[in-house]
Image (spheres, grey):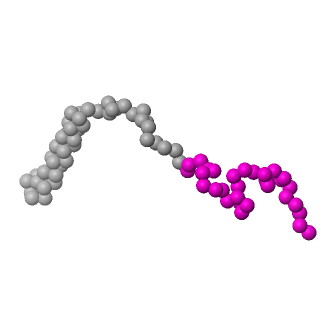
């Protein structure tokens, strides 16, 4: 025994093809466009001078650490 379709409006939905597919142009695009301005100001964050200063400080600390390690290996520093 075959039951009929319980939803009679399903047969009258516009945009559906007979097999249940959707023709091109009936559906919205899959993703939104993000080409507009996102609200980020140009002056967010530190200036180039502050960034350069921090890079310099970190570089000096790393250089001193490496010099200490090399000096310890060579025998310049006697820790014991």
User: In the depicted view, which residue is nearer to us: 66 or 18?
Assistant: 18
Q: Is residue 30 left or right of residue 56?
A: right
Residue in the picture at 48% in, 44% down: 33
Image quadrant containing the C terminus: bottom left
Residue 22 in view of the camera: yes
* 76 lies above or below 52: below
Say which quadrant the N terminus sits in. Answer: bottom right
In front of the other: 35 or 11 = 11
Q: Is residue 78 visible?
A: no
Tell which of 49 and 75 is nearer to you.
49
Magenta-highlighted residues: 1-30
**Quadrant of the rendered image containing residue 61:** top left
* Quarter where residue 57 is shown: top left
Residue ID at (15%, 46%): 64
Q: Position of residue 75 (x, y in %)?
A: 9, 57
Residue 80: in magenta span: no
Residue in the image at 67% along x and 59% along y: 21
Q: How far across and down, in percent of the image, does residue 37 sit? A: 42, 35
Measuring from the top left, give residue 45's x and y in whole percent: 32, 33
Name the residue located 20 percent from the left edge and 36 percent from the top edge. Answer: 53
In the picture shown, does residue 24 fall above or below 2? above
**Can residue 16 be found in the magenta stretch?**
yes
Tell whether 12 sits left or right of 49. right
x then y, percent, for residue 50? 23, 33
Q: Main secondary structure of the magenta part?
A: loop
């Amino acid at each position: 025994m075959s039951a009929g379709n319980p939803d009679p409006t399903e047969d009258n939905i516009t945009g559906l093809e007979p097999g249940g597919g959707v023709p091109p142009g009936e559906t919205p695009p899959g993703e939104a466009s993000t080409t507009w301005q996102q609200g980020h100001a140009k002056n967010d964050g530190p200036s180039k001078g502050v960034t350069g200063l921090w890079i310099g400080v970190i570089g000096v600390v790393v250089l001193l650490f490496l010099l200490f390690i090399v000096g310890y290996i060579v025998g310049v520093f006697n820790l014991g």
